[in-house]
Image (cartoon, rainbow, N blue to C red):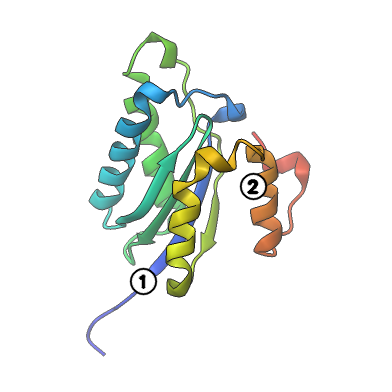
Amino acid sequence: MAQSLVRNLMHIIFSTKNRKPLIIPSVREELKAYLIGTLRNFESPSVETNCVDNHVHILCSVSRKIVLMTLLEKLKKTSSKWIKSKGPALQGFYWQAGHGGFSVSPSNVPAVCEYIRQQDAHHRTMTFEDEYRAFLRKHGIAFDERYVWD
């Protein structure tokens, strides 16, 4: 087989440092566009992306040429630098050190996309911390609460 054909669909979640509500409405759409463009530059196109006040959800097809950890390091580094340029109120912006990455079956893409689009409504009834714990449990990821957060 001469070609390497891969489709790694990943639902990626990461928050602002200490889950501070720094993704203010005035920069959300622009941040979303920035993240989508950066993913495209790393040959990991976004399927769905959404930002809420303290975290981001991304469903993307991770390139076969890059490991998830490297993609996230580059995505967070460049977007953090970019968002800090958006005004004095965002000078102290940082992403959390870690991230969550959850594989998605192609048959589940529509449901995951809808879930990502509905984040504002979802977080009227559930905190980010509870949502993230639920993802970890759903995907069978053992975790120690002391080390999940910044």
Task: Looking at the image, tell me whether mark 2 or mark 1 is earlier in sequence order.
Answer: 1
- Up-down: is 138 above or below 69? below
* Residue for point 37% across, 20% down: 84
Instruction: Kindly identify the amino acid type of the residue bearing the numbered disc 2.
Output: Tyr
- Where does the C terminus fall, quadrant-wise? top right
Residue 38 at x, y percent in the picture: 28, 44
* Residue for point 33% across, 62% down: 63
Residue at the spot of label 2: 132
Residue 101 at x, y percent in the picture: 53, 56
Where is residue 37, by image quadrant? top left
Instruction: Kindly identify the amino acid type of the residue bearing the numbered disc 1.
Output: Arg
How packed mark 2 is, by other alpha carbons closer than 10 Å (few <14, some 14-19, many 20 or more), is some
Per the image, label 2 sits on a secondary structure element best described as helix
- Up-down: is 118 above or below 21? below
Which one is in front in this view, the residue at disc 2 or the one at disc 1?
2
Q: Nearer the viewer, residue 86 or 73?
A: 86
* Residue for point 49% across, 67% down: 104
- Where does the N terminus fall, quadrant-wise? bottom left
Q: Which label number is shown at residue 7? A: 1
Q: CA distance from mark 2 to mark 1?
A: 24 Å
Per the image, label 1 sits on a secondary structure element best described as loop
Residue 52 at x, y percent in the picture: 48, 34
Confirm or deny contact between disc 2 and disc 1 (CB under 8 A): no
Is 11 positioned to the left or the right of 66 in the image?
A: right
Q: Nearer the viewer, residue 35 or 42?
A: 35
Q: Is residue 141 visible?
A: no
Is 150 positioned to the left or the right of 7 in the image?
A: right
Residue 141 at x, y percent in the picture: 69, 60
- Up-down: is 19 above or below 100? above
